[in-house]
Image (tube, rainbow, N blue to C red):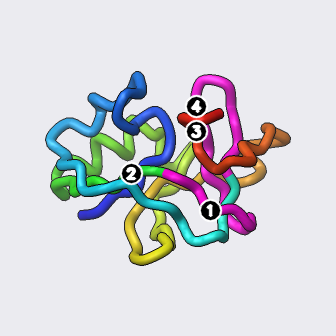
Amino acid sequence: MLIFVYGTLRRGEHNHLQLGPARYVREAWTAPHYELVDLGDYPALLESGADAVRGELYEVPDSWLSHLDAFEDVPTLYERKQISLDDAHALGYVMRRDVAGSAPRISSGDWCAR
């Protein structure tokens, strides 16, 4: 299963180890249909934006998805959804706008460059 990560699960970030047995595939950008916002300690990907968001693709065993869902607090904070990348599709974690509130937009689309 391909998972797109864009925040604290990326290489060099403090929650990267939560990916466990996942295998890094490559860097990736979403199609320009999203918005990335800063919630302080972590970002949130929102649908219905106009930005491309930078992240990484990982191949994750199906058996590890329940661990990631629990870590991402699905369905309370995030939903696991199909993400449109610039050249493919993958699963990823999306937050509802009503949960994100008025968090500031990360205009670069890159959590690591904020």
Q: Amino acid at mark 4?
A: Tyr
Q: Which residues are magenta?
A: 36-54
Q: Nearer the viewer, mark 3 or mark 4?
A: 3
Circle 1 SS class: loop
Asked if the stretch drawn in magenta spans residue 53, the answer is yes
Image spot of residue 89 (x, y percent): 40, 74
Q: Which mark is residue 42?
A: 4
Q: Which sits earlier in the primary sequence, circle 2 or circle 4?
A: 4
Q: Nearer the viewer, mark 2 or mark 4?
A: 2
Give the alpha-carbon distance from disc 2 to disc 1, as whole Å.
13 Å
Image spot of residue 9 (x, y percent): 40, 37
Q: Amino acid at mark 2?
A: Glu
Q: Is residue 59 left or right of residue 101?
A: left
The residue tagged 3 is 111
The residue tagged 1 is 52
Give the alpha-carbon distance from disc 1 to disc 3, as whole Å.
12 Å
Give the alpha-carbon distance from disc 4 to disc 1, as whole Å.
18 Å
